[in-house]
Image: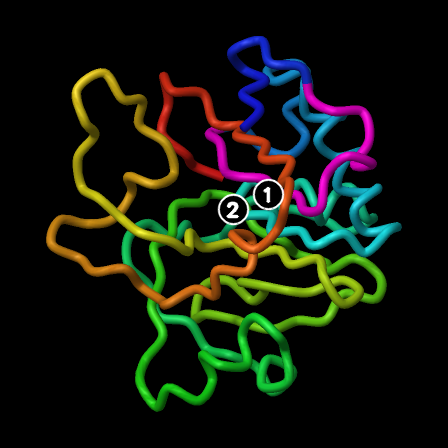
């Protein structure tokens, strides 16, 4: 895992990687002065799209993907914080990641923590999930690049001693994991994992 805020050097290409995972952070997708590694992350996302490298971009990661591919990110009229309901769109039924979730018969909920959102999708992006406050909760570019505004995964309410707070610690007290996410990244041999969230500040974007 690369932690650029701690001085880790991001890879310049994805030649030696089978997948890319970009996580959340408290900065916005245009905050290059505050986070000077963001241009390099956006370039990796552009490379992933060009080569259809399996990619999951989460929260700020999705916002960076949007900007990198020519879409627009704007300030959200109403931020989403906490456990929120999601609505899969028709296009999600045939999607490799979201298809199984559309047949559960129950409500889909996920942890949210963002003040900004994708306003205009990149050209060619397929919208997959929406919510009451955020039109674009998830989309796919090509066959293997996904952006999600929410935080999929396993959630805890507290950090272990000495462990930095990151996007994995945003769930409200007592909540369960919001979705059973396919373990597609676990099957990849090498994943370029970019954690862009500083441990001194919880994720917001």
In the image, is 153 to the left or to the right of 139?
Answer: left
Report the residue at 66% width, 43% height from top: 20
In the image, residue 93 lies at what x, y percent?
58, 86
What residue does disc 2 label?
59
In the image, is 98 to the left or to the right of 127?
Answer: left
In terms of secondary structure, what is the magenta stretch mainly? loop
* SS at mark 1 in the image: strand
Q: Vertically, is 133 above or below 16?
A: below
Residue farthest to the right, as pictured: 50
Report the residue at 22% width, 44% height from top: 156
Q: Is residue 16 magenta?
A: yes
In the image, residue 166 lies at what x, y percent?
37, 32
Q: Vertically, is 66 above or below 184?
A: above
Upstream in sequence: badge 2 or badge 1: 1
Quote the CA–CA distance across marks 2 and 1. Answer: 11 Å
- Mark nearer the viewer, 2 or 1: 1
The disc placed on residue 21 is: 1
Q: Is residue 67 magenta?
A: no
In the image, residue 160 lies at what x, y percent?
18, 27
Colouring scheme applied when the structure was drawn: rainbow
- From the image, which quarter does the N terminus lie in? top right
Residue stretch rendered in magenta on the structure = 10-26
Residue farthest to the top, as pictured: 7
Residue 147 occupies quadrant? bottom right
Q: Vertically, is 31 above or below 43?
A: above
Q: Nearer the viewer, residue 73 or 50?
A: 50
Residue farthest to the left, as pictured: 174
The disc placed on residue 86 is: none
């Amino acid at each position: 895992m690369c932690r650029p805020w701690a001085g880790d050097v991001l890879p310049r290409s994805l030649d030696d990687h089978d997948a890319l995972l970009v996580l959340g952070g408290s900065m916005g997708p245009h905050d290059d002065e505050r986070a000077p590694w963001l241009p390099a992350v956006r370039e990796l996302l552009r490379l992933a799209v060009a080569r259809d490298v399996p990619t999951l971009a989460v929260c700020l990661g999705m916002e960076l993907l949007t900007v990198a591919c020519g879409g627009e990110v704007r300030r959200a009229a109403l931020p989403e914080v906490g456990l929120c309901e999601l609505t899969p769109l028709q296009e999600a039924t045939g999607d490799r990641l979201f298809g199984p979730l559309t047949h559960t018969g129950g409500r889909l909920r996920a942890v949210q923590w963002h003040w900004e959102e994708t306003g205009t999708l990149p050209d060619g992006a397929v919208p997959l999930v929406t919510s009451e406050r955020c039109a674009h909760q998830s989309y796919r570019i090509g066959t293997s690049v996904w952006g999600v505004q929410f935080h999929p995964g396993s959630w805890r309410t507290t950090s272990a001693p000495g462990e930095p707070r990151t996007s994995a610690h945003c769930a409200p007290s007592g909540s369960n994991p919001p979705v059973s996410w396919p373990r597609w990244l676990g099957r990849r041999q090498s994943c370029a994992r970019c954690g862009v969230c500083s441990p001194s500040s919880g994720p917001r974007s």
